[in-house]
Every structure is written in C-alpha cells, then in structure tokens.
Image (cartoon, rainbow, N blue to C red):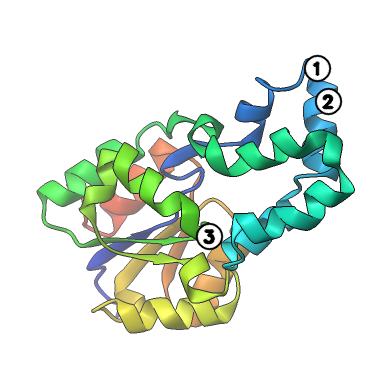
Amino acid sequence: MKTATKAVLWDLGNVLLDWSPANLYRKIFDTEDAVQDFLGRICTMEWHAEHDRGVSMAQNRIALIAKYPQHETAIRIWETRFLEMVTGTVPGTVEAMNALAGRDIPQYALTNLPAEWLGPVCDNFPAMRHMRDIIVSAHEGCIKPDRRIYEITADRLPHLPGEVIFFDDRPTNVEAARDFGFDAEVFTGEADLVSALKDRKLLP
C-alpha cells in the first residue's frame, strides 16, 4: 500500500525562483557572446558550486580575480547583485504553495544555495514564509545530489521520507532523492506540478 503523502519539499532555483546568471550579465556585457563566454569560462557553474558547498564568495573570488583582474567588477557582482539574476517566480509555484498553506500542508525547502543568498531570498519572496524549515547546502557543507544532504533532510523533517513529495528541476537530484526513499518528481511546470499534488491528495 502506497504511503500517504503528508508534506512537500521544494527546491528553489527554477522551481520557485526564475533564476539565471545571464539575466544579470546581459546588463554588463554588450553582446550575448560575451555573456556566454564569461559564464562559460570565468564565473562558471563549477566555480559557483563551491559557494553552494559553503565556501564564502569573498574567499572564492580571490583566485578568480587574480587570474582575470580585468573582470574584477563583474566577478564581484555575482554576490552583490544576485537579485538581478532572478526575473521573478516560476509561474504556478507560488499559487501552489499558497494553496497548500491554506490546507495546512507542511512545506519545506531543500536548496543548493550560497549562505549569502538565503537572506535576500527570504526577504524578497513572500512564499518563503510557508517553509517550516529550509535545508541550505552551504550551511551543511554538501550539495544535491550527494546522499548526505538527503540524510540531513530526513533527520530535520518530522516525516518519513516516503511521506514527503520533493520537487526539483534536475533529474539527477530527483533520482538521488528517490534512491534515498523520498517521493520525488522532476519539476517541469505548473500543469505537472498541480497534477502531482492532486494525485497525492494534497490539493483537491
């Protein structure tokens, strides 16, 4: 018999937050080629992953600025102008969060996020008030899809993993969550999100 779903666990980037560094750097560079070169060669996702693991931005940018001093300003604004990477919220997610809150369904977040960005996210996106706990990779020193972060999450949540539906936009993160024991779905947009919540009797 399938375990009844009692709670929702949310990824944030590109599930709640419509996030892309290119949104900011298109304001800095004159051409799309220059934007993609900067993000593909200098401020890469591999470099950024160290922030998600808990390395401070102040520390992580030192070597990068030394290597690319001509891009010091552009490197520094990765931290200081983070909110300009976010165009808003992903359609449908806030509405789903509000509807779940109205039914008193517990909601939590599990996010690969730098410590420096948690405050701005919570301060600028009202739907974050629905989160009863937020597991932040930078605070834990490990990132999805590492098994350890799912162990930490299971310890923090007052539910069995099988009682929690987790939404993440990255299939590798979803697969790792399922392997650990969470119910999990790849987030693809509003229609599939609502369908998944209704299937689990979380929404009427």
Q: Looking at the image, which residue is at 50% across and 47% down?
A: 13
Q: x%, y% of residue 147?
A: 56, 80
Q: CA distance from mark 2 to mark 3?
A: 27 Å
Q: Is residue 94 left or right of residue 179?
A: left
Q: Looking at the image, which residue is at 48% across and 49% down?
A: 187
Name the residue beneath numbered marker 1. 31
Name the residue beneath numbered marker 2. 34
- Is residue 54 visible in the rendered image? The answer is yes
Name the residue beneath numbered marker 3. 112
Point out the residue furthest to the left here.
103
Q: Which mark is residue 39?
A: none
Q: Secondary structure at mark 1?
A: loop
Q: Which three-letter amino acid code belongs to the residue tagged 2?
A: Ala
Looking at the image, residue 144 lies above or below residue 204: below
Q: Are marks 2 and 1 in contact (CB under 8 Å)?
A: yes
Looking at the image, residue 153 lies above or below residue 69: below
Q: Which three-letter amino acid code belongs to the residue tagged 3?
A: Asn
